[in-house]
Image (cartoon, rainbow, N blue to C red):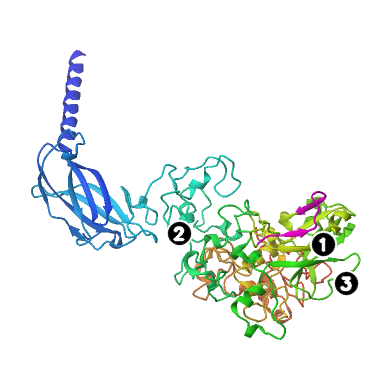
Amino acid sequence: MSKFKLSFSLVLTIILVGILSTSVFARGAYWGSLTGDNSGWSFKFINTSDEAKDFTVKVYSNEDGYTNALYTSPEKTAVAPHPEPTGAASEYVTITVTPDNVNFQLGVIYKFVLVDVTGDNELATETKYGVTTVNDTNKKLYNVADDPGMVDVDGSGLVNANHTGVPGAASKGGNKHGFYQNNTNSCAACHQTHTGADELLLFKDGVYSTCSACHDGTTGAYNAFATSTAETTKEIAGTFNIKTDSAHNGSLHQSDGSINVSAAPGGGKSNTAVWGNEFNCASCHAPHGAGSTMENNLNMDPLGWGGVEYKALAAGKTLDGATDAEKDALNGKLFKDLTIIDLDTNPAGLASFIKPYVVAKKTVAAADLSATDKTKEGYMYSRAGVQLGQKVIQTYRWTGKAYVKDFSLWLRGSSREAANTVLTGAPATGLTIVWRDGFAFGAAASVDSVTKAQISLGIDVETTTNIRSLFDSGYANYIYDSGTEMSKYCASCHTDYLSTVRANLTGTYTQAHRHTTGKDNLTCVRCHYGHGSDATIMKDANDESYFEGDHKGDLNYYVDPNPSSALKRYTGMSVCYACHGGGGQFINNPANEAIDGPTSAIYGSHAVVNDAGVQYDDGEAPLKAGQPGTRE
């Protein structure tokens, strides 16, 4: 027994000595620091082996996958050893790679390898990655990391105490986007007070780079670049993770700042304050919170139309002869000096066109309320607490045929801001203003005290996780008016595409007949995604996608015939056939039965009709099973 113990101890001692000896003799150079400045990249290292060594630095680029060396520095020969380094300045040796050696480019990641070239063999001892950051305000900022995936290509290259941009940092005092507390540190999630990468003091150079740093699936935040799944087909956004090759024909909202808002189809093409701004994530989303903070952070006033005063064209002037500024004024959502139309005493006060939006008041009747039926406009009153017999003052909009109640958000600012709603004469108490839904109510005396109004209209889109809540009144989570608000939202940029009737020439910048979009049941996002689309998430007329149904897994079947799928939810024009395919022109087509069978010889197998066969025209009709967007 003792012999075994002795032998084991001896063996263990030999092994430990061998390990320690190996670790001592295997030690080589290690980095002291890697820095960049106008003269190039400088590397300081200490030779921690027990003998003099020869070293060189080799430089590679990510442009060819770090395959071919761009440069090999002259050798530093007989570098003195320091087996037990103290970190004294005298122990360090510096090798510098200048722009004369390598033509360093902005945004290109370079790999620097310290190589022991003593003797006949080369041994890579240390590797670092560096980049001259893509920064518009300072072209000489540098970033270094041990891993190429950690190199901050478009940041400032400078650190701050809050560790801005690091997951989990700056989390004290509320959400990152709105609902801040008085002890908040949330600002530091995106901004660096003294070390910002751009003029907005963002930790990345540009809005897109800043947003995508968190919303790319790496931090636990909403992933805008998620891989497509069956659930993606039910979402409003789709995904930015699309493919544009001929097998997918993907398309996306190019929100990286490379184009201006004026590139939007159906919008203005001028370089005015509205259209000349770059298109990026903040063109649609409000990073500091909005009326829809809990629903996708959609901006309350995209492009700032709420601060542009509406002005009609001068008498005799046509759209063709209008200036860019005059066209912009036609789309303005700031209405000044509005007379309050009293519908109690003047029931015909809204009989004909006055302005695109007007303000009227009336006494609330039983028919104006809907306590439980979310499909009725009266639900908007009831959920706000409006009572029978009270008076309501509200915005009305012109549809091309008549004025209807409008529930656009009323923007409120200060007297110094253009986008500001003012009810002149409003009492200090007794008048409740429902800013989010654009109306006010109270006792008759309180409402009647308002003598005129300035209305600044914004947009508040109430959504759920399922897009059906925007357009299908038969869906349990349907929200009245949200589909219409979503269309208005899209029309902030795609101005001419908002239309409540297809029979009239519409548009502020161009005129043509337009498909109806100004209703819940025909909201823009029923046919289009917000972020991006390709064959993997596009559907056919049966509301089936690549992930289900008779053509599951068949990309060729779902790929759009056009190189760009135009953010569509449905391949080709299949959504048209889904809605109109049972009409008289298609009555003998046997493929109709593949949808859900003809039920109306006039309006198609998927027409929005009630049980009596009468077509709805107000966006309140529940959809039938099989209609676009109803498949679960």
- Most distant residue in the top direction: 2
The disc label shown at residue 348, or none: 3
- The kind of residue on which mark 2 rests is Gly
Disc nearer the start of the sequence (3/1): 3
In this rendering, the label closer to the viewer, 1 or 2: 1
Above or below, comparing residue 505 to residue 299 in the picture: below
Residue 355 at x, y percent in the picture: 75, 73
Above or below, comparing residue 81 to residue 288 in the picture: above
Residue 627 falls inside the magenta stretch: no
The disc label shown at residue 373, or none: none
Find the distance from the CA under tag 1 to the CA under tag 2.
46 Å
Quadrant in which residue 364 is drawn: bottom right
The disc label shown at residue 206, or none: 2
Residue 279 at x, y percent in the picture: 52, 66
- The kind of residue on which mark 1 rests is Thr
Q: Is residue 628 visible?
A: no
Near mark 1 (Cα within 10 A), the count class, few <14, some 14-19 or many ≥20, is some
Q: Which residue is mark 1?
A: 451
Q: Is residue 597 visible?
A: yes
Quadrant in which residue 134 is drawn: bottom left
Residue 402 at x, y percent in the picture: 80, 73
* Residue extent of the magenta highlight: 419-433
Residue drawn 22% across the image and 48% down it:
43
Residue drawn 89% across the image and 53% down it:
388
